[in-house]
Image: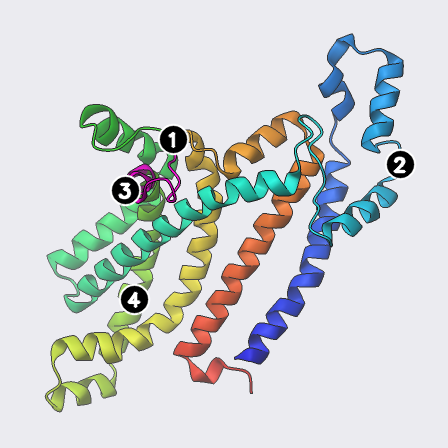
Amino acid sequence: MFRLIAHRLLALVPLLLIVSVLTFSFTSLLPSDPVDLILGDTGTQEQHEMLRERLGLNEPVVVRYFQWLGRAAQGDLGTSFFNSVSVTSAVMQRLPVTLSLTFVSALIAIIVGVAAGIAAALRPRSWVDRFATLGATIGQAIPNFWFGLILVAVFAVSLRWFPATGFTPISTSPWEWLRSVTLPSIALGLSSSAAIARQVRSAMVGVLQQDYIRAARAQGLSTRRVIFRHALTNAMIPVVAVLSFQITVLLGGALIVEQVFAINGLGTLAITAVRQQDIPMLQGLVLVMVALVVVVQLATDVIYGLLNPKARPS
């Protein structure tokens, strides 16, 4: 297992290098000049040249890339073109917000998805199975941002059970933090729970028909032990890959749902950077998001290796 983790961490280095090269290349092809966006139409030619020199935009792209790469290796992702804020500080300030939203929505997706999948698998072709399948289909068809708007209208505006917008840090008030992330997490998590429920149901139906499950039941083991100790453990092996993909989807979906609930996470930062064509901020955000996805993939490989010893490297 240690060798697997070491291999994945070593693979992270060339991946981040490739992503950084692609990001730098794409941002250099943006049609608008950041200097024009900063100064507007009122800036003189001399002011434009001075600002381009200060921002380092007169240097060739290759030179700018290696300068940025050297600073990034030391943890410095540059400075925003528009507010002179450190990109690293801005990203680290917003990162806990997006991670909180992703964590709670993943928890909801796993609990609801696994429970619905098990219930459907235990009673195939029953009304429970049909209801779970219908719910999964509807859950995957509804866009999470539209579902978020419905949740706000019902539970925030009409019933006033939860705040409609904003985010409260957990360090300030754990209860208010939970209230602030509940609605956006439900909006995100239910769509992913639908995909997880489908996979769990399919895997559980196959596992419950295996001979060792029949033998366990014949030995007099309780239904709960057969399901959770034997069947679910083996059924979760193919489900882990779906979980990894869905958590990655949740990370991307959180950037959109943050706009619906006016949450100042990485999504707000990314949209502002795109509108302003803030190149250093865009580069830093892309690099951090790729690193998060790789960490999720690493955790998936570790969990898969724990569930399936045959997948562990020798």
Distance from the alpha carbon under mark 1 to that under mark 4: 39 Å
Distance from the alpha carbon under mark 4 to that under mark 3: 37 Å
Amino acid type, label 1: Gly
Distance from the alpha carbon under mark 2 to that under mark 1: 41 Å
Return the mark for residue 202: 4
Among the two numbered marks 1 and 4 on one chain, the one whose residue lies closer to the N terminus: 1
Point out residue 170 in the picture as x, y percentages from the top left corner.
37, 44
Amino acid type, label 2: Glu
Point out residue 41 in the picture as x, y percentages from the top left corner.
76, 10
**Residue at (24%, 87%) from the top-left corner?**
212
Of 126 and 292, the residue lying toward us? 292
Point out residue 311 in the picture as x, y percentages from the top left corner.
48, 80
Magenta run includes residue 66 = no
Among the two numbered marks 2 and 1 on one chain, the one whose residue lies closer to the N terminus: 2
**Where is mark 2, residue-wise?**
59
Among the two numbered marks 4 and 3 on one chain, the one whose residue lies closer to the N terminus: 3
Span colored in magenta? 166-183
Q: Secondary structure at mark 3?
A: helix
Q: Is residue 301 left or right of residue 138?
A: right
Amino acid type, label 4: Ser
Q: Is residue 70 left or right of residue 148?
A: right
**Residue 7 visible to an observer of this rendering:** yes
Among the two numbered marks 3 and 2 on one chain, the one whose residue lies closer to the N terminus: 2
Distance from the alpha carbon under mark 3 to that under mark 2: 51 Å
Near mark 1 (Cα within 10 A), the count class, few <14, some 14-19 or many ≥20, is: few
CB atoms at circles 4 and 2 under 8 Å apart? no
**Where is mark 1, residue-wise?**
166
**Residue at (48%, 39%) from the top-left corner?**
255
